[in-house]
Image (spheres, rainbow, N blue to C red):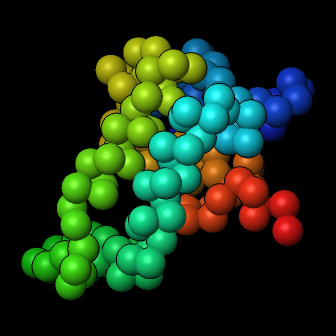
């Protein structure tokens, strides 16, 4: 997976293994249309209170352990977040879901948020403070 700084302002560029020569681009999160930005933020804020528990759970899954969801966690939150993410990719990177795997999509989302200076559960309004 390659993440490269863009010479274009306010753009995040990346490549995926299946198409190493194709350069995909997303606007930085703070430049998304409000309808998409709000969907991502709303779902991110709902998941933020479970961030540590979900990270711990993922580590245990990676280690081959059986795990239960955190108490009170609604799995529909993940479904909603994935749908919001897919809406962004379908708008700006049509066809990406046909060539990228789940690990790559998750890695792209994390790096895109880092480059955009926005963390899961942190609204764009508060990211500049």
- Depicted 70 relative to depicted 78: above or below: below
Q: Quadrant of the C terminus?
A: bottom right
In the rendered image, residue 73, in percent from the top left (x then y), is placed at 24, 74
Q: Residue at x 19, y 76 (%)?
A: 69
Residues 23 and 44: in front is: 44
Number of marks in the rendered image: 0
Horizontal relation, residue 108 to residue 31: left or right = left
In the rendered image, residue 109, in percent from the top left (x then y), is placed at 53, 46
Residues 92 and 25: in front is: 92
Q: Is residue 65 visible?
A: yes
- Depicted 56 relative to depicted 1: above or below: below
In the rendered image, residue 34, in percent from the top left (x then y), is placed at 63, 35
Residues 19 and 71: in front is: 71
- Depicted 30 relative to depicted 9: above or below: below
- Depicted 10 relative to depicted 57: above or below: above
Q: Quadrant of the N terminus?
A: top right
């Amino acid at each position: 997976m390659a993440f490269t700084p863009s010479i274009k302002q306010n753009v995040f560029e990346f490549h995926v293994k299946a198409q190493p020569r194709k350069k995909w681009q997303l606007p930085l999160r703070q430049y998304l249309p409000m309808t998409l930005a709000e969907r991502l933020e709303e779902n991110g804020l709902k998941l933020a209170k479970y961030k540590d528990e979900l990270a711990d759970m993922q580590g245990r899954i990676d280690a081959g352990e059986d795990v239960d969801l955190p108490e009170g966690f609604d799995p529909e939150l993940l479904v909603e977040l994935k749908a919001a993410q897919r809406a962004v990719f379908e708008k700006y990177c049509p066809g990406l879901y046909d060539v990228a795997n789940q690990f790559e999509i998750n890695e792209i989302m994390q790096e895109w948020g880092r480059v955009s200076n926005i963390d899961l559960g942190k609204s764009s309004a508060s990211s500049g403070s």
